[in-house]
Amino acid sequence: MAVVNGKEITLPQLNFALDQAKAPENADKNAVRSQVLQQLVDRQLLVEQARSEGIDKTPEYLNRQRQADDQLLITMLAARRLNTAQLPSDREVDAFIAGHPGMFANRETWSLDQVQFATPADPNIVAEMQRTKTMDQLIAVLQAHKITFTRQKNRLDTAVIPPELYTRLSTLTPGEPFVVPVGSRSIASIVTGKEPNPLTGDQAKPAAVGLMRKQQTAKSIEGLLKSLKSSAKTEYQPGYAPPAKKS
């Protein structure tokens, strides 16, 4: 398809890139092919430059490459499990839909008023925040302890909320904040508006099947990992072993 400084860009490479591009059905196929091929040429030129600068020999590159290879293998393993997973029955699908109202019949889009801040290390401050019943009270706690924060508006589709959390959030009094940790930070939110957005009928079942298959795949991978751990011989250097499980 093209040769860049003696290195060939093959038809399988081009076809894979075209598949990844996901061009619209009505797009000019020749124009798309030409554009994608040029992108491959440009990428190859930049790769050659990176190699000429020795980037591919650095420890950081080697570690990132190893991590990327590992993640790709795990992702493809999960995809293989997903593709071979048994489809749920109609009864199982109906039960799943009924058991997840926040994703289907009662699905809503929530408008949120949010405050983002670094999660306090002091458990007493965390407990103090948990006792607040309004956003103003929570902000007052942050200000009292000189914790900087940012305020923002956001929207949340209840379909992405885990069922257990959805049940808890549904019982909050209007204006009561809920706090979700995100890495080393926390986001406190109050619901300022709710817009019905139900997913029912013919639209609900395909979505439910997709979610059920993903959950089934996750359980399959979890079971596989447990089995692999039990049969593997893993030796840790002194001081690096995980803590022993409490009986």
Image (spheres, rainbow, N blue to C red):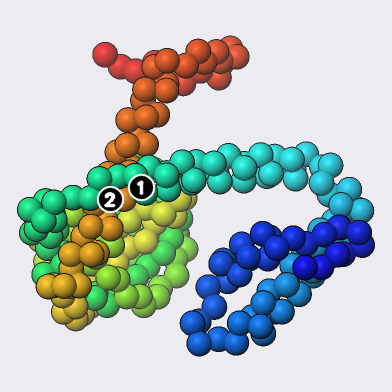
Which residue is depicted at the point 47% across and 63% down? 148
Q: Residue 126 appears at what percent x and percent y? A: 32, 48
Q: Residue at 34%, 70% (x, y): give it.
A: 114
Q: Provide residue 56's location: percent of width, then percent of height.
A: 82, 46
Mark linked to residue 82: 1
The residue that appears at 92% across and 53% down in the rendered structure is 52
**The N terminus lies in which quarter of the figure?**
bottom right
Mark with earlier residue (2, 1): 1
Amino acid carrying mark 1 in the image: Leu
**Does 187 appear above or below 155?**
above
The residue closer to the viewer here, 114 or 223, is 223
Is residue 241 visible from the viewing direction of this image? yes
Tag 1 secondary structure: helix
Q: Gap between marks 2 and 1, in whole Å?
A: 6 Å
Question: Does residue 15 appear to the left or right of 98 in the view shown?
Answer: right
Query: Residue 106 sits in which quadrant?
Result: bottom left
Badge 2 amino acid: Arg
Q: Which residue is mark 2?
A: 213
Q: Residue at x 47, y 16 (%)?
A: 232
Numbered disc 2: secondary structure: helix
Dot 2: within a 10 Å radius of its alpha carbon, few (fewer than 14), some, or many (20 or more) residues?
some
Picture quadrant of residue 238: top right
Neighbour tally class for label 1: few under 14, some 14-19, many 20 plus, Cα within 10 Å: many
Report the front residue among 18 and 246: 18
Label 2–label 1 contact, CB within 8 A:
yes
Q: Position of residue 113 (x, y in %)?
A: 31, 74
